[in-house]
Image (spheres, rainbow, N blue to C red):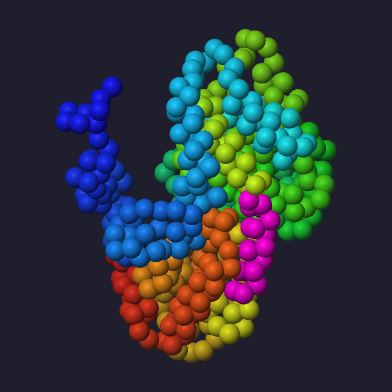
């Protein structure tokens, strides 16, 4: 052990001495395109600290987080209950990851998760959302004896080879073949599902109840009818709730919006971590787990080196306790309804604003072709260079002028996705709606810095072709 003095490791000193090199270090040693992209769109900020739904820079300016680390920060950043749980589990010096014992924390977290999933029986803990989906793919194939998994167009389930095989975005798949022989069907198309099931080799359909890319919800009745079709053909329904689960849509799981839907396997991650320790979980029916782990010889047929580690389990238990104590799910429903209604009221006012959709605090704002000649010509210019540039034009002033962090919902999409921490309230709704209204006013004025930035984006898009 060291005291953090000369010769020892001192994290504070290291950050004080080298923290200013952050963008240079990334450019030199990590993904060099990330700092390049951030510099181009003006997102190269330096955030000093964070709490709840806010960041602060060195000058003390606050920034409203409407992105939540792609959904990871469900209960906000640095929640004191989660912090204390992690301090406590480190101080306990548990005999963790011996691999040949049964620690209490994984069982306790599984028990707590399953109280929210009464039709499911068992849990496998991994380290991420993509790993949770990988687990479901393996379990479905083994349990059914069939090789092929169906997924929906435009789906995003992860970027490992297995999950990439069920990724509906071509841009992520290009150059990584050969992938697994899985098959895409349109979201909501029961006839397409029926045709594929008739081939007799389908293990499962994996579906996001609300797709993160574009924020498209499964049509009413689709999940229930798909479940019936799948079971008739001895195939499984897998619900990918990595982003939509744990209260995001105003219910604990997004599939719970539709009565009678009981997926055979459910994948969660992101918010379960509390923003600290990576964790993923695959929940499933007892018969599936018993088939995969059918004998002592198969006890480790599927495992994860860091799965069920004490820090992740403690964080998960703390997160679920916070959600119960602070009624996070109800807040997501109420605040999400308010935000969506106030944004939807702007659709008739602004011709560039096409639609506002979503559930709870998962909201998509879609832009579309305007009717007036002046705006239409500028819209056409952007679309000719690269689809999605207008949405980026909106995201940038939200950050630069109004200090609100958002994201474009996917490549080549004119959609902004809002997935803020589930702890936001009326004040944050007011701040976002006022800022968004201001940006829309600028966009419809037909001049100013916003369209100047649009021309910069056009040049960049053309240069990258």
Q: Residue at x 73, y 37 (%)?
A: 115
**Relative to 38, 195 lies left or right:** right
Q: Position of residue 271 (x, y in %)?
A: 55, 45
Q: Position of residue 345 (x, y in %)?
A: 63, 79
Would residue 269 be visible to someone looking at this image?
no
Q: Residue furthest bottom?
A: 373
Look at the image and tell me in which quarter the N terminus lies.
top left
Q: Is residue 332 magenta?
A: yes
Look at the image and tell me in which quarter the C terminus lies.
bottom left
Write down the quadrant of residue 221 in the picture: bottom right
Q: Residue at x 17, y 28 (%)?
A: 7
Of the pair 118 and 367, the residue shown nearer to us: 118
Q: Position of residue 64 (x, y in %)?
A: 45, 63
Q: Which residues are magenta?
A: 326-343
Q: Is residue 396 magenta?
A: no
Q: Position of residue 83 (x, y in %)?
A: 47, 40
Dominant SS in magenta: helix
Rendered position, 171 above or below 367: above
């Amino acid at each position: 052990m060291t005291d953090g003095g000369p010769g020892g490791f001192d994290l504070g000193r290291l950050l004080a001495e080298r923290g200013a090199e952050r963008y240079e270090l990334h450019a030199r040693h990590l993904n060099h395109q990330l700092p390049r992209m951030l510099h181009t769109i003006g997102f190269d900020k330096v955030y000093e600290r964070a709490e709840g739904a806010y960041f602060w820079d060195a000058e003390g300016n606050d920034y409203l987080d409407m992105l939540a680390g792609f959904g990871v920060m469900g209960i906000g950043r640095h929640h004191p209950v989660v912090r204390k749980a992690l301090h406590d589990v480190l101080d306990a010096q548990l005999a963790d990851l011996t691999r040949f014992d049964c620690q209490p924390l994984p069982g306790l977290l599984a028990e707590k998760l399953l109280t929210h999933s009464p039709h499911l029986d068992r849990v496998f803990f991994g380290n991420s959302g993509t790993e949770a989906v990988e687990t479901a793919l393996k379990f479905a194939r083994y349990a059914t004896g069939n090789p092929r998994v169906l997924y929906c167009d435009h789906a995003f389930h992860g970027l490992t080879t297995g999950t990439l095989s069920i990724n509906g975005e071509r841009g992520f798949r290009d150059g990584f073949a050969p992938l697994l022989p899985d098959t895409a069907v349109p979201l909501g198309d029961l006839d397409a599902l029926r045709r594929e099931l008739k081939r007799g080799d389908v293990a499962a359909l994996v579906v996001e109840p609300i797709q993160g890319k574009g924020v498209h919800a499964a049509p009413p009745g689709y999940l229930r009818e798909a479940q019936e079709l799948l079971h008739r053909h001895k195939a499984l329904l897998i619900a990918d709730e990595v982003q939509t689960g744990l209260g995001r849509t105003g219910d604990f799981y997004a599939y719970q919006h539709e009565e009678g839907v009981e997926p055979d396997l459910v994948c969660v991650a992101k918010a379960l971590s509390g923003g600290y320790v990576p964790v993923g979980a695959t929940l499933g029916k007892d018969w599936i787990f018993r088939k995969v782990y059918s004998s002592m010889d198969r006890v480790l047929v599927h495992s994860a080196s860091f799965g069920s580690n004490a820090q992740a389990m403690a964080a998960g238990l703390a997160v679920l306790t916070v959600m119960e104590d602070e009624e996070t799910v109800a807040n997501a429903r109420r605040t999400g309804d308010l935000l969506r209604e106030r944004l939807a009221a702007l659709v008739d006012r602004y011709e560039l604003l096409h639609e506002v959709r979503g559930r709870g605090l998962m909201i998509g704002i879609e832009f579309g072709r305007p009717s007036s000649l002046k705006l239409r010509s500028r819209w056409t210019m952007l679309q000719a260079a690269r689809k999605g540039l207008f949405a980026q034009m909106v995201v940038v002033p939200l950050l630069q002028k109004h200090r609100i962090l958002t994201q474009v919902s996917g490549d080549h999409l004119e959609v902004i996705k809002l997935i803020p921490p589930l702890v936001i309230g009326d004040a944050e709704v007011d701040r976002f709606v006022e800022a968004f209204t201001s940006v829309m006013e600028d966009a419809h004025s037909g001049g100013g810095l916003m369209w100047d930035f649009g021309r910069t984006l056009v040049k960049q898009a053309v240069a990258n072709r």
